[in-house]
Image (tube, grey):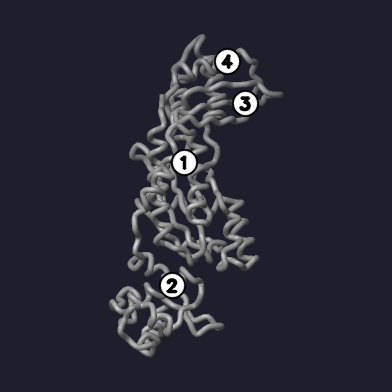
Amino acid sequence: MSRSPANLDPRSRHLLRTLISRYIRDGEPVGSQTLARSAGLDVSPATIRNILADLEEVGLLASPHTSAGRVPTAQGYRVFVDSLVQVQPLGEGEVTRLRSELPAGTGTQALLGNASELLSAMTHFVGVVSAPKREQFAFRHIDFVPLDGRRVLAILVFADNDVQNRVIEPRRAYDPSELERVANYLNQHFAGRPLAEIRLTLVRELRAARDEMEGLLAHTVELAEHALVAPGDDMVLAGQARLMGVQDLSDLDRLRELFEAFARKREILQLLERTLRAPGVRIFIGEETGLAPLDGVSLVTAPYVSGGQVLGVLGVIGPTRMAYDRVIPVVQAAADALGAAIEATPKA
């Protein structure tokens, strides 16, 4: 047998696939006697032991101290998901479920929450969805409501039916009539345009404005630069508690680190953003994430697209011993369904 994991002979590949599939199913180290019975090869247990020893030597398998059987390493899982796993398309019933629970016309934020919950429910792991950048969406309507002091509540309705309330604090206090004039001006002249474009246009128009328009535009620019700047991009998580019952993640210190990473969100969001421009499903196994708290888990991701534009990424976080043949099509189908729901949402 070749000493390189990239050049396994067919018999070694078959045994590796069989061993990893059985380990994913049962969670127990797999021995040569078990493989001899389940692999369907006309070879002796001794021959199988030799092949397993070779696979261990090239780093694809490991032998736990408590058992004579072997378990896959992160590198073994990588070979498995890259070239050995046999993925079948998601069943029509499950595709229908995804589409029915991610209906067009729902606000984007609600769709993100539904998608993360569905991913968690269908895989029994953690569902994660990164939110689209609000800069990409046109706004439909804006209202300003005076609060106490200088604070103002900006109510933005976007073209995808999402509604966001943002408390802003401009440099001076505005009375209700001024706020109404600014809102009317924005709604009349800029409805249907993306936020970043509105800010640039306002600044350009202010420079060219004269006389009576200058005051209104100056007020509009100040309020707009606060209200129309999208808050930091976020993500939606669902099903974190499911990981507490996973046998492979029973170490309390590791779980605590993982849950702290979920709470911070920042590192996981940055990891998701690394996959924004990569079409199709991507899989990070253990230390491939580059995040220490995720060393013992895998992340399966896919971008979701609307109107030919990548809006964000969704995925599943679970143990490295996950049923990849099951999780991969769920993630891809969920990405397709979420993108289709956002694209089909009325933009009027």
Q: Quadrant of the N terminus?
A: bottom left
Mark 3–mark 4 CB contact (< 8 Å): no
Sequence order check: which comes first, mark 1 or mark 4? 1
Residue 285: mark in rendering: none
**Where residue 40 appears, x then y in whole percent?**
33, 78
Question: The disc labelled 3 sits on which kind of residue?
Answer: Leu
Mark 2–mark 3 CB contact (< 8 Å): no
**Front-most of residues 176 and 99:** 99
**Front-most of residues 92 and 286:** 92
Nearer the observer, disc 4 or disc 2? Answer: 2
**Front-most of residues 246 and 296:** 246
Question: The disc labelled 1 sits on which kind of residue?
Answer: Glu
Residue 101: mark in rendering: 1
Local packing at callout 1 (Cα closer than 10 Å; few below 14, some 14-19, many 20+) is: some
Residue ID for mark 2 = 22
Residue farthest along the left direction in this orientation:
10
Residue ID for mark 3 = 153
Sequence order check: which comes first, mark 2 or mark 1? 2
- Distance, label 2 to label 3, CA atoms, is 57 Å
Residue in the picture at 57% in, 64% down: 246
Local packing at callout 3 (Cα closer than 10 Å; few below 14, some 14-19, many 20+) is: some
- Distance, label 3 to label 4, CA atoms, is 12 Å
Local packing at callout 4 (Cα closer than 10 Å; few below 14, some 14-19, many 20+) is: some
SS assignment at label 1:
helix
SS assignment at label 4:
helix
Q: Is residue 228 above or below residue 206?
A: below
Residue ID for mark 4 = 180
Local packing at callout 2 (Cα closer than 10 Å; few below 14, some 14-19, many 20+) is: some
**Where residue 225 appears, x then y in whole percent?**
54, 28
